[in-house]
Image (tube, rainbow, N blue to C red):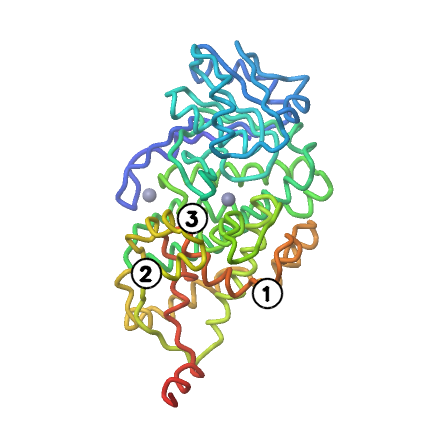
Amino acid sequence: MIIDSTQYNGKCACGREHKMETILSVVECGCLHEFERYLSTAEIHGVRTAVYDENTYRATADRHPRADHEIVLPSEDLHANEHGVDLLLEKLPTDTQVLIAVGSGTVHDIVRYCAYQKGMTFISCPTAASVDGFCSSVAAMTWHGCKKTLTAVAPKIVIADIDIIKNAPIRLARSGFGDMIGKYVALTDWKISSHLTGEFYCKRIADMTADATAQVLESASGIVAGDEAAYTKLMYGLLLSGLAMQMMGNSRPASGAEHHISHLIEMHPESLGVHSDALHGEKVGVGTLLAIREYQAICHDTSITFRDYARYSKEQIVSVFGETMAEEIIAENAKDAADGVSAEKLMECLDVIRHEILSMPDADTLEGVYKTLGVKSSLSDIDVAPETLPALLDCSPMVRNRLTWMRLRKCIVRKEEESHAVQR
Ligand SMILES: [Zn+2]
Ligand SMILES: [Zn+2]
């Protein structure tokens, strides 16, 4: 399967002109053997450095892309953070013009960030269907302990060899599945925001992401069986979601409240006492079920009303994140995406908000699919204490200044609260 992303270039009904960095993505068995041919078709020339970690170097031993230099990063303790970046920059030959990532999400984020910093052409060779970031133009990094989405560069071409991908540990595919199922929430958040604030919305990008998600949902049973076609679908979905982010210029279509829950767990502020070694998509998968359950609760509550949106106070942020981390979070929320959302507007949009929320699959149905595939579905599955749930829901929107329904939850006034207030 070949995705020719030049088809997305040009003027769109949303009013913007979309520009894709990625020319083509190949999702096929054995396509790494054809690496030279694809590079010359795309007219990519120059001194090449291929970057692996120890595992992916071994996994691709019979089909390493030809490169002038090879760098093998240690698999142990390798993260997409400032240390990972330093590790690569120390070894990176200065004559490199084309930087090739052969690995999963972490290797990709490190390589794409360095390629951007050094102005090098970036080529992606995913070795596992673990995340949707392969095609994106941003790098998801933990920078000095804080989750950050940093400007990076999108790959010119993507060569996704299904022979390699379907033989990667199945936990990675489960993680990719979780990352993709999160799009239901992300797309709902985006749509709700466009209704409430008039935030830019592109139907074409949203439809692309929804199509990618549907493909992945379909692939679930085949993944367990190690079916080649199912892995192709999963990988196609992951790449398409990344291309949608590229069209958008940020992660809006692919990341909403479910990702914020995952980011908060990853930042593990001391006050929350959470820590999890789960993979990105595993946390997103759990965050997705939590968010859908929470969102759907308002659909059946006929008594709710709203108050105007009020920002998080500095004290609140400090009490959750502690002095050191709070500085970044305060800066992140300095220009609040939900400013100006009034009780009146929320009431006016309530029906369409409910409609958007009910368009997501039901949480129990999704959980059934998770079980079929063996995907982690609860906080305890990812070693997070279930008692932290209220704090995760309340505090996760702080990590990213983006309008989500989770951020607007504090505007909800329930009947009981109202009567307490009157009694007081
Ligand atoms: Zn558009
Ligand atoms: Zn993700």
- Of pointers 1 and 3, the one earlier in the residue sequence: 3
The C terminus lies in which quarter of the figure? bottom left
In whole angstroms, how far apart are the C-alphas of marks 1 and 2?
33 Å
Instruction: Please indicate whether residue 293 sits to the left or right of residue 382 in the image.
Output: left
Find numbered disc 1 in the image and state the secondary structure of the residue it sits on.
helix
Point out which mark residue 387 bears: 1
In whole angstroms, how far apart are the C-alphas of marks 1 and 3?
23 Å
167 above or below 221? above
Rendered-image quarter of ligand 1? top left
Query: Which one is closest to the eye, mark 1 or mark 3?
Result: 3
Tell me the residue at 44%/35% (across/down).
Answer: 139
How many marks can you see?
A: 3
Tell me the residue at 69%/55% (across/down).
Answer: 371
Q: Are marks 1 and 3 in contact (CB under 8 Å)?
A: no
Find numbered disc 3 in the image and state the secondary structure of the residue it sits on.
helix
Label 3 packing within 10 angstroms: few (<14), some (14-19), many (20+):
some
- Give the residue type at disc 2: His
Residue that lies at the very extreme toward the right in this rendered image: 225
Cβ of mark 3 under 8 Å from ligand 2: the answer is: no
Q: Nearer the viewer, residue 368 or 252?
A: 252
Instruction: Please indicate whether residue 402 sits to the left or right of residue 276 in the image.
Output: left
Tell me the residue at 66%/28% (across/down).
Answer: 164
Q: Position of residue 121 (x, y in %)?
A: 42, 20
- Of pointers 1 and 2, the one earlier in the residue sequence: 2
Point out which mark residue 195 bears: 2
Q: Position of residue 36 (x, y in %)?
A: 53, 13
Residue that lies at the very extreme toward the front in this rendered image: 323
Q: Which residue is mark 3?
A: 325
